[in-house]
Amino acid sequence: IAIVAFILGLLVIVQLRTQASGAAFAGLSSQDLTVLVANLNARNDQLRREVANLEGELAILTDNSQRGDASLDELRADLRRVRLYSGIDAATGPGVLIVARGPIDGSAVEDLINELRNAGAEAIGIEGTRIVPGVVVAGGPGSVTVEDAAVGDPFEIVAIGPPDKLTGSLTRSGGIIAQLAATQPDAVIEVTPIESATVPATERSLVPTAGRPRL
């Protein structure tokens, strides 16, 4: 009985408020009602404009966010390439393996390195030493040194890059290997394309000691 009485009371209150609201509007003149409707329409138009403006701002922010993500990805990719080319990071990928035997000198090894760079090698290593600017390869026939460390006989040069392009550049008719065969006939240089190789990162400090960027 209490529940039924409570529900009936709610219904009576709602009915009374509805009638009061209707009575309030009934007491308004047609001119007042026209003004009220005009105000409501104006307020609705204002709200629609605010919604449209907010949606436009949201679209701009979303587009800028997407562009920012794309720019950030590009910067990260550029950083990876710079770190790779500078030798800060180790490099892994297809390339060529060069095995040198016999009395070859440091200048001949430098010529091989330069030919590899010109052919598009992205990373070069000699017996575990990353070749970067400043690394010195020197020595007479049979006593080649890299960073003042003697290499054995035979020794290996690993280059990361397109295997077919690197191999073709080294072994082409009149190329560097043919030239070295004429000038250093007792040295033997073998080139083998490989599907995967790793060149370690450099151990040299690449921080300039005297130079500074010019802005």
Image: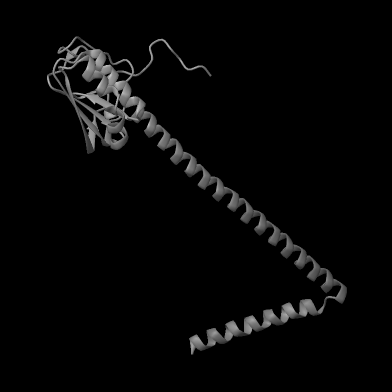
Which residue appears at 60% of the width and 49% of the height? 60
Image coords of residue 47 (percent x, y): 69, 61
Q: In this image, 104 relative to 47: left or right?
A: left
Image coords of residue 209 (percent x, y): 38, 11
Image coords of residue 46 (percent x, y): 73, 60
Compared with residue 152, is residue 198 higher up or lower down, i.e. above or below?
below
Which residue appears at 62% of the width and 56% of the height? 55
What sort of colour scheme is used for the picture?
one colour
Q: Looking at the image, how many numbered discs can be counted on the residues?
A: 0
Nearest the camera: 105 or 36? 105
Asked whether residue 155 appears in the rendered view, the answer is yes
The picture quadrant where one finds residue 179 is: top left
Asked whether residue 162 appears in the rendered view, the answer is no
Image coords of residue 117 (percent x, y): 34, 25
Q: In this image, 26 relative to 115: left or right?
A: right
Of all residues, the one furthest to the bottom in this rendering is 1
The picture quadrant where one finds residue 96 is: top left
Nearest the camera: 68 or 137? 137
Nearest the camera: 131 or 15? 131
Q: In this image, 78 relative to 163: left or right?
A: right
Q: In this image, 60 relative to 179: left or right?
A: right
Compared with residue 192, is residue 12 higher up or lower down, i.e. above or below?
below
Which residue appears at 45% of the width and 36% of the height? 75
